[in-house]
Image: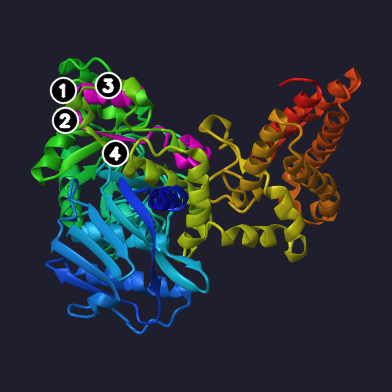
Amino acid sequence: MQRIYILIFLLCCKNLQAQDYKKILIPYPQACSFNGARFPVNEGFTISVRGEPDKRIYSAATRMLTRLKGRSGLFISQQEVVPGAGTPGSGLLIRVTRAANNVLGEDESYHLVITVDGIMLNAETDLGAIRGLETILQLLKAGNGYYYLPGCVIDDAPRFPWRGLLIDVGRHFMPVDVIKRNIDGMAAVKMNVLHLHLTEDQGFRIECKAFPKLHELGSEGEYYSQDQIRDLLHYAGERGIRIVPEFDMPGHTTSWFVGYPELASAPGPYHVEHRLGVMDPVMDPTRESTYTFIDSFLGEMSKLFPDEYIHIGGDENNGRQWKRNPAIQLFMQVHAIHSNNELQAYFNRRLLAITEKYGKKMIGWDEIMQPGIPTSAIIQSWRGMEGLARAAKSGYPVILSSGYYIDLNFPASDHYLTDPLPDSLHLTTAQRKLILGGEATMWSEMVTWETIDSRIWPRTAAIAERLWSDASVNSVPDMYDKLERISPQLEELGLTHEKNVDMFLRRLAGNENVAALRVFTDVLEPIKDYGSIDYAGYTTGSPFTKIVDAVRPDAKVAREFNILVRNFAADSKDAVSEKKIRQWLIQWKHNHLALRSAFRQYPAIDDVEMLSRDLSVISVSGLEALDYIRLKKHPPLLWRSRVEKELQQASIPRGMTEIMVVAGIRKLVERAEGYF
């Protein structure tokens, strides 16, 4: 009987540990079990490699060793991992069966075993081993005065083969170091495709030797040389990440026409666009010279970018230049082309033939899915799940981006609960296989190199988990716990999403005001969705250094406050929640007074002064609501009327930001009024 109790106890401990690591590992593995064993990590720790891997496993293992030293402070004697180095019995033994081809669908699985005697990481390919190294780093824990890795057995592989991040370098150019640090962030959460949006109305960002005026005149001097691209390709490849280039056409092409106006559907001259939004300029699809040009251009780019995919964009062509061009209208009549959609389909078929000529597969946005476009083209779905389902049911491979638009500032939970394969799509087994995965999209209208990290991380880690882990891994509270843990680990890679916040606040309002300004901005978020963003006053040259640029999506303090209020509204005897709610409300009540001198002194923050005042006012009302609840006293009608006006006032965005605790305070008021 005693042995049974011991067995039950051990099983309970194992289950508790598994639950604990569900709040740590991101993406969570497909299958894992934990036990009470611990492998201590000390100065004698070594890494060795066996098998037939690509040489990149040695640089990956060396980087992992460096990060392990930095995270633990241990003076581990091994400096780098090279063939034949390391002692298998004193640390991590990596076994790789073969070198991977870094292509879509390559094996990324790994098998990890940690015991008191050592760590064994087995993988079919070096890509799988690289993914497993990230899991090991996330497992590192400290306790009883030493670092250790918990005993476990993990079998893991991605749910989807395409797990990407789009970075738009066209509207705002992103220097090479920005791209590299985001590649490192992607690798840390097992993403494997960097989609570079290289051409836009606002800039042509890549050197072209065949047509040098593309980058010389279309970039205002901000572009990547081909040597820099080769360096990025190597950097990404070392981390198991493919780079897919996008050359958007026929629309979003103003920068092409600065040097080559003959490509356009309306006469020039053209200049690099500084405005934001959808523009009229579009390529002329009726001239053979257009395709001769594109053929030469894509031929050069195909040699530069080794990936089998090229993205041709194809989105948001409003067709106005086509309608105003008599020659284009005559061409449409002669060829029985009845609409702009049909004309673009004609253009896309010509592009498809060119990409296939160079051994590439063509990807385009939803708009390219027109009658006559072969199913060899891949659709990137951005306009909704209906488009994704329609593409798959029509036989097209599909990449999902709808629901993963991180530039729209929605909370991580929204992205996390967007599954590329919901049951509601009613797809057959064959159609489900056409869903390749998804991509987070970081469009850069409203970000610069200083702010882009704060819009990508850590929310993109939630998308990474959605694309790697099983669909059943969907606990939002666990997800937020994991983001909280992974965020400082991403900082180790040079990402600036955390540290740049206070830097912006110091810049805006001086060092002496940072503490009070941080209290205020901790409950602010940028407004959400394109319909709310006022591009009218912005150009690419505008200052992106306002409060809206300093605050981040998914304000942690606001989220935690709203959760506490929800708990308290359900149980008004929850004294712990009430105490914390009251502390926050008191702090916000007095914070506006602490900021008044800053608002008078620093005009850069005056667009949010009203929000600060509103936060103070509704915090007073929240405290009053708490008192009514504690006293079990029904508030008078005049009080309710006054508070409702205050909450409505506080709900109005200012400076393109909004107060995220309005909902929580409103719930307190409703609870005081007797609503449940």
Q: Is residue 567 left or right of residue 481?
A: right
The residue where tag 2 is placed is 349
Label 3: how many Cα within 10 Å (few below 14, some 14–19, many 20+)? some
Q: Residue drawn 67% across and 61% down?
A: 507
- Whether residue 397 appears in magenta in the rendering, the answer is yes
Label 2: how many Cα within 10 Å (few below 14, some 14–19, many 20+)? some
Separation of residues labelled 4 and 3 (CA atoms):
16 Å
Q: Is residue 347 left or right of residue 525?
A: left
Closer to the chain start, of discs 2 and 1, is 2
Q: Nearer the viewer, mark 1 or mark 3?
A: 3
Q: Quadrant of residue 499?
A: bottom right
- Whether residue 181 appears in magenta in the rendering, the answer is no
The residue where tag 4 is placed is 437
What count of labels does the image hold?
A: 4
Kindly identify the amino acid type of the residue bearing the numbered disc 1: Gly
Kindly identify the amino acid type of the residue bearing the numbered disc 3: Arg
Closer to the chain start, of discs 3 and 2, is 2
Separation of residues labelled 2 and 1 (CA atoms):
8 Å
Closer to the chain start, of discs 1 and 4, is 1
Separation of residues labelled 3 and 2 (CA atoms):
20 Å
